[in-house]
Image: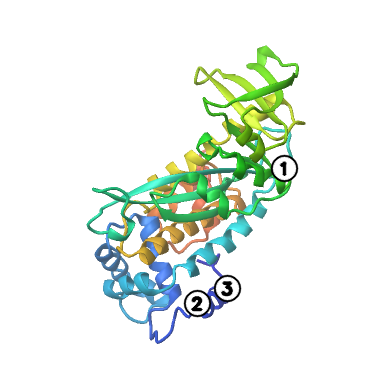
Amino acid sequence: MDLVHRQTLERLVQRYGAETRVRHFGCRQQLICMIFAQLTWRESLRDIEACLNANPETLYHLGFREPLARATLAEANEQRDWRLWRDLALGLIVQARRLYADEPLGLELGNTIYALDSTTIDLSLTLFPWADFRSTKAGIKLHTQLDLRGPIPVVIDITAARQHDVRWLDELLFEAAAFYVLDRGYVDFARLARIAQAGAFFVTRAKDNLRFTRQRSLPVSFAAGLCSDQIGNLTQATSRAAFPWPLRRGRYFDVETKRHLVCLSNNLQIPALSVARLYKLRWQVELFFRWIKQNLRIKHFFGNSGNAVRTQIWIAVTVYVMIAILHKELKLPGTLHRTLQILSVHPFEKATLHELLTEISPNPLMMTSSNQLTLW
């Protein structure tokens, strides 16, 4: 919890007026409850209440002056502006990106590389009528821009599940000289033109119905899996009007999946193999979605309103980024999953994080009984 500075949280509380007429259950106490629920995989508000109230001394030292009531926590999640937790997570994201800025990606590129994708979370239409998706189900969609050095989520937008992925590009601000790796569901040449106009680059897969006019071909290495590397323009008049600049189309055979990938990019300078490898890095965003769904509570919610759902998701993102920061600052072995699992079984451990999380090889002399005499 020391990663969440009190002054920072207090400024956010004042910005959104989150503690108006609050007597004893402030935003910090709400955050502690929700982080505890994420780390220890609690099932319900009643579960959170029972487990935390079983540690009254610990709760007192964490700032709780009264036992936790689940109705109080539910009311805080329903009424306190979820944007407070979004801004808190974004502040931690800035800190995490600085730590992972030099993380290697296996590419000789100094540019920032982002992957864009979305994942759908299914909900009950009876409990979440505001998130209606189809006639029999509800759902929300997490649109995510992931910095692949980490990987760290930079932008997360929560919308109704019915919104198409490509429309999210209208809301993004693109960073000059950065690479944006997209699936072919985002192929809309008018929107891709905005990336090029911002001085950024995109790498995506071509759709099957793409019409492309080749102007010249570049040499390729068939041994590396490259089949072709071409420079040209879009053929159809409407597509060329939307994107009038030259494009690069490369065909690459992926040995792992036994598939041919046809990639498009507006960067004409980097090697063709780097374009294919950039697109393969897009899989990192899929792994990020799988990680947070399997290790954090974002598929089962403690409240039914839109505000409660967004609050829980942003606090889950906060937990992910906090673990990533600890993992890097303490230079911990293993993966983020290992760090999370250790923290989940020691939520109130009175030990420094470095001692708790660092692997220490057992000392044979320390394991020997003090009453046993040594012969040598």
Pointer 2: what residue?
16
Residue 134, position in %: x, y?
Answer: 29, 48
Q: Are marks 1 and 2 in contact (CB under 8 Å)?
A: no
Q: Is 96 on the left-hand or right-hand side of 296?
A: right
Q: Secondary structure at mark 3?
A: helix
Q: Is residue 32 visible?
A: yes
Outermost residue toward the right? 269
Outermost residue toward the top? 223
Q: Secondary structure at mark 2?
A: helix
- Residue 286 in the image: above or below residue 71: above
Pointer 3: what residue?
8
Q: CA distance from mark 1 to mark 2?
A: 36 Å
Precedes in sequence: disc 1 or disc 2: 2
Q: Is residue 373 visible?
A: no
Badge 3, how many Cα within 10 Å: few under 14, some, many 20+?
A: few
Residue 160, image quadrant: bottom left
Residue at (59%, 46%) from the top-left corner? Answer: 150
Q: CA distance from mark 1 to mark 3?
A: 31 Å
Precedes in sequence: disc 1 or disc 3: 3
- Residue 233 in the image: above or below residue 340: above
Residue 127, position in %: x, y?
Answer: 24, 59
From the viewer's side, name the closer residue of 259 and 249: 249
Residue 115, position in %: x, y?
Answer: 57, 42
Question: What amino acid is found at the position of numbered circle 3 in the picture?
Answer: Thr
Residue at (43%, 42%) from the top-left corner? Answer: 290
Pointer 1: what residue?
111
Which of the two marks, 3 or 2, is nearer to us in this view? 2
Q: CA distance from mark 3 to mark 2?
A: 13 Å
From the viewer's side, name the closer residue of 317 and 231: 231
- Find residue 353 and name its label: none
Residue 178, image quadrant: top right
